[in-house]
Amino acid sequence: MPEASRQPRSRYPFFAPITTRWMDNDAYGHVNNVTYYSYFDTAVNLYLVREGGLDIQHSGTIGVVVESGCRYHEGIAYPEPIEAGVRVGELRNRAVRYEVGIFREGGAESVADGYFVHVFVDRATRKAVPIPDRVRAALEKLK
Amino acid sequence: MPEASRQPRSRYPFFAPITTRWMDNDAYGHVNNVTYYSYFDTAVNLYLVREGGLDIQHSGTIGVVVESGCRYHEGIAYPEPIEAGVRVGELRNRAVRYEVGIFREGGAESVADGYFVHVFVDRATRKAVPIPDRVRAALEKLK
Amino acid sequence: MPEASRQPRSRYPFFAPITTRWMDNDAYGHVNNVTYYSYFDTAVNLYLVREGGLDIQHSGTIGVVVESGCRYHEGIAYPEPIEAGVRVGELRNRAVRYEVGIFREGGAESVADGYFVHVFVDRATRKAVPIPDRVRAALEKLK
Amino acid sequence: MPEASRQPRSRYPFFAPITTRWMDNDAYGHVNNVTYYSYFDTAVNLYLVREGGLDIQHSGTIGVVVESGCRYHEGIAYPEPIEAGVRVGELRNRAVRYEVGIFREGGAESVADGYFVHVFVDRATRKAVPIPDRVRAALEKLK
């Protein structure tokens, strides 16, 4: 389950700045609930590319999402810039659970909290495999 | 929490056919985990418009999403067409929990199962209000 | 340039049915101008997969878009279903220009008209190559 | 028509920084052609909000897109950050043509060049109206 209440910034060791987009706002004028999940994906994979050596086009081991969730505490809207904080909630042999908090730029507490679980698989066979050492080392830093 | 295992079609009283899109496939060649949530939104609001009298631009009471989640059992990919089955899991005074199963066209069991919770609010003030009678009547049919 | 005026259905030999989505509507309540291009991509690649033998994950030759454009004659909005009509405007050795008309379901005249140009390239080197015979044969049928 | 060749930064008086997203990359591993148009929308409306007093939810006069186009000179891919440069190509009584160049962060020449035409309309009636004075003053600065 995602966090039930707003989280402080201090809980997240890594932050990705994200610019919102015109299309993020839906017919009700706020960022659509779906779009938050694209913020989660964007922040986590940025970390995996920068710190874990992920090559999106060529890495032999990739993470596939098997579960995700989000709780929305307060609305946000384009054009305000946001930040996504990332921590690792659980690190297993073949899987990791990322917990992501969405913050207004410089905000003290999250406006939404979500998570997703990556199972690592062989790119070609899509069979589960152990998390590669370099990725694991990077993920350890987010615990 | 979303359903932990594949669900049979019989559990869903309403189905929305959905055509997948080129952009649904991500860099790993399957429908991105984020996109499933747009299928959920699309199927539920189709029902609300058709059966609950929702006027997206003008209704005084609208549903805002406060929580969502999904479990992904099996990958799908554009260009295969899909179907989203919708049922109501819990119906309260001011909120409803929708449970949505994603099926390959004609598939017997879901490839992903998700849910989201709508709290109904006044469009202008965004304060929670009781579910309008016509919407409630429509939602009752999905229990 | 895209067509300056509404086009009749008879100009398009291939039609792809497309279901609109909640997120297609932007803050102004109609399908966002950007989204039409995703309809173009979706319709053309559906044809390439079905008739031209395109394997999105493995084909050695892929089409990359070098130019695109659209004129919007009339607004549309989710949840109305639409159709995208496709014809080939120009077929060269290494490139093709697709012309796509967006229609309301069963509509006599287009609500938007666009085009895009695919240059075919080697998947690995991204160097331009001749259009594969099977793809060319399929494209000839759309002229 | 969009610019046929790469444009230098000096041609654009306003720049919006944009963070790319995981979902921007399509099955071919680069930013999908459709997504560039969302960068255009995002950069132009950011300027309209900041400098032209646009209130997305409440302004009585809004811009609707009647034509758009893009030429793609070179591919880009998430997670690289980009910038969108905006200038006004033509400013008429009820319409404006924006020309937008997409640059890698700090890049000297554009990787893609596009444009779109806004016709200003009354929010409720969707009839064309003159560009409001405050918006016009802001647009004049981009010529």
Image (spheres, coloured by chain):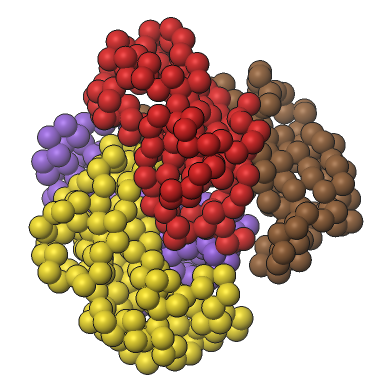
Chain colours: A red, B brown, C purple, D yellow
Q: Which of D76 and A4 is in front in this view?
A: A4
Which quarter of the rendering shows the C terminus of chain C?
bottom left
The spot of residue D92 in percent (x, y) is: 33, 90
The answer to whether residue D108 is visible is yes
The picture quadrant where one finds residue D30 is top left
Q: Nearer the viewer, residue A27 or A74?
A: A74
**Residue displayed at 44% across by 36% down:** A85
Which quarter of the rendering shows the N terminus of chain C?
bottom left
**Residue displayed at 66% across by 67% down:** B57
**Residue displayed at 26% across by 60% down:** D84
Q: In this view, does C38 lie to the left or right of B120?
A: left
Q: In this view, does C12 lie to the left or right of A3?
A: left
The spot of residue A82 in percent (x, y) is: 44, 49
Q: Is residue C70 left or right of residue D88?
A: right
The picture quadrant where one finds residue A43 is top left
Residue B70 higher or lower than A137, as above or below = below
Q: Nearer the viewer, residue C14 or B76?
A: B76
